[in-house]
Amino acid sequence: MKAITPKQIKNTNRQLIYNLIYKQEKISQQEISYTLRLSRPTVTANLNELEETGLIYKNGQIDSDLIGRKAAAYSIVPDYRIGIGVELSRRVVKIMAVDLYGMKIDRIVVECRYADSEEYYRYITSRINEFIDGLQVKKEQILGVGIAVQGLVSPDHTHIVYGKILDCTGLEIEAFSRYLDYPCSFIHDAKSAATCERWFSPELTDAFYLHLSYHFGAAVIQNGEVVNGKHGHNSTVEHITLDADGPLCYCGKRGCAETFCSLRALLQGEEEEDFFRAYEAGDPEKLARWQSMLDHLADLITSLHLVYDTDFILSGYLADHITEKDFQYLYKRIREQTPFEEEEDFLKLGKMPKHSITVGAALPYIRRFLDVLE
Ligand SMILES: [Zn+2]
């Protein structure tokens, strides 16, 4: 084993101190010293260096139990670095800047129909550049642009390996990055939403995340990471066949989970609000459609839960409408099909942070920065 060099120790202390300030949001030098068991001079030297670099700042005073009076407090500078998240969909493009806490700095929505054309990429990237200029920050503050797409992304995040919804299979990141002077990458929208869910639920280390929105998507979270898979199509459970004679899926097969457990499947031409208004008023036909969605969802979870014994997080537009009664129903149906006893503790509603797909697209850049501080 190689010995640890003094430089590595210095870097580790710097990282530990920064991470603690980040986590506590506001903390005194004494508390840093005490919590990390580091000497006062070591902490002072690191705080000075972090402050000079611009990573942290003195943020007023804080009550300190350790010294029994007020002490100077330190906080991180949240916009020292910024991540840009972009969500591409058929009709609109959402663009957002988030700080090191994953909080929104600014957001715009650009109405523009997706087309696989030079004109489209040039226009969208010009809007992204305009948006970044409007933030009035230094260029080096921008860590990168994450682009969430309704499609499966290659493990190196550079191209779309399957994009039937937008008809963008084979799209290269270069279509965007040639006009953007920042690192760029693609991320699958369901994985983006899962990344955001995970970010705002630090206790969430392992789960099967089901994103029940206009389309159905999923992601597996393992050891705190969203798993991409060997070929980029991990957890594409939306194409598991639930009924070979079922409705036609956009993938060309019949009866995929997508055709039962998505908002698109639930609506039959009507608007979402109209559907749920009638559903809440007890319209029997709408109730039957919702019931069918729940039945298929329970059947899918039954199989997935046999493969992967973990929590299942339900999120997306549909999850907003899932009631406690629906949960009981799902458990009952799952139990009826599972050979052994099941606890009723593995179905959970997501926290569903606002704009989760757009925010989630920016977060990998933020995560990487926080891990190395460079
Ligand atoms: Zn399908």
Image: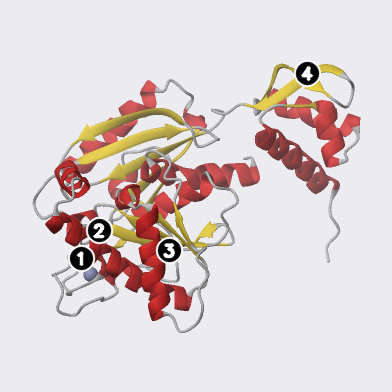
**Residue 229 position (above or below residue 320):** below
Q: CA distance from mark 4 to mark 3?
A: 45 Å
| Residue 61 percent across, percent down from the top left | 75, 16
Q: Are marks 1 and 2 in contact (CB under 8 Å)?
A: yes
Q: For mark 4, does the 10 Å Cα neighbourhood hold few (<14), some (14 to 19), or many (20 or more) residues?
A: some
* Mark closest to the chain's N terminus, 4 or 3: 4
Q: Does the CB distance between marks 1 and 4 fall below 8 Å?
A: no
Q: Is residue 326 left or right of residue 34?
A: left
Task: Identify the mark nearer the N-term, 3 or 2.
Answer: 3
Does label 1 or label 4 sit earlier along the sequence? 4
Residue behind mark 1? 259
User: What is the CA distance from the residue labelled 1 to the residue labelled 2?
Assistant: 7 Å
Q: What residue is at 34 percent from the left and 47 percent from the top?
A: 320
In the image shown, does 193 or 291 lie closer to the viewer? Answer: 291
Q: Quadrant of residue 56?
A: top right
Instruction: Identify residue for label 3.
Output: 155
Callout 2 crowding tier (Cα within 10 Å): few <14, some 14–19, many ≥20: many
